[in-house]
Image: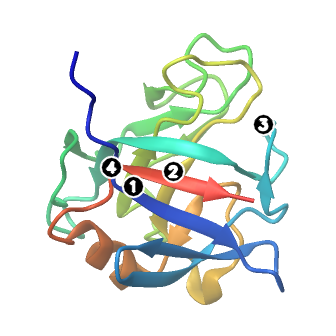
Amino acid sequence: MSKSRPLRHAVVARSPAHPARGTLRFGNLTYPCALGPAGIVPLKREGDGGTPMGVWRIVGMLYRPDKVAPPRAHVPVRPIAPGDGWCDAPGDPNYNRPVDLPYPASHERLWRDDGLYDVVVVLDYNLARRSQGRGSCIFMHIARPGLSPTAGCVALARQDLLRLLAAPHPPEAVEIVG
């Protein structure tokens, strides 16, 4: 039996001075990033404002075809359409899954006017083995101006996220450390 190659990780660490800010490092690249207002948490709960600690595979990418070119990726890449959403309602059968809008339960709209989801890196947090209420919509995406806090995602400045994804061998996982 052969050993599998280790994943290429981008490592996110919290800033000591500000729990909702951090640094993403990948090879010789280092970028400031935004985190949830509660900082990095070892046990994520829906709505707690925490960014979940752990190693999360990059399982897909979404992009706004009217705003950016398809990102280079080793995972499936899909354009976002105006009717795309992501369910964030604990107890709903589609919790932490993509949904078509309109959708009756609480959800995130992926086609946003603010540009935050022009590029979305889907992380395997609570996806493969979902646990209701453990957090949903944990992505890596474009940051708000000034790197203001996310709801629990990792967000980078637009140009930094695009540079990271354009690396010759981009990350296959994001490791979020406490």
Q: Position of residue 132 (x, y in %)?
A: 72, 19
Q: Quadrant of residue 129?
A: top right
The amino acid sitting under disc 3 is: Glu
Q: Which mark is residue 93?
A: none
Location of mark 1 (residue): 120
Q: Earlier in the sequence, mark 4 or mark 1?
A: 1
Q: Earlier in the sequence, mark 1 or mark 3?
A: 3
| Residue occupying image coordinates x 48% and y 20% | 128
Is 15 rendered above or below residue 41?
below
* Alpha carbon separation for disc pair 1 and 3: 19 Å
Q: Earlier in the sequence, mark 2 or mark 3?
A: 3
The local crowd at label 2, few if under 14, some if 14 to 19, many if 20 or more residues have their Cα within 10 Å, is many
Q: Are marks 4 and 1 in contact (CB under 8 Å)?
A: no
Location of mark 4 (residue): 172
Q: Nearer the viewer, residue 51 or 80?
A: 51
Q: Quadrant of the N terminus?
A: top left
| Residue occupying image coordinates x 52% and y 64% | 11
**Left or right placement of residue 171 versus residue 24 in this view:** left
| Residue occupying image coordinates x 35% and y 74% | 27
Disc 2, SS: strand
Q: How is the protein colored in the picture?
A: rainbow
The amino acid sitting under disc 2 is: Phe
Q: Earlier in the sequence, mark 3 or mark 4?
A: 3
Q: Position of residue 19 (x, y in %)?
A: 81, 73
Q: Quadrant of the C terminus?
A: bottom right
Q: Position of residue 123 (x, y in %)?
A: 46, 43
Location of mark 3 (residue): 46
Disc 1, SS: strand
| Residue occupying image coordinates x 69% and y 54% | 152
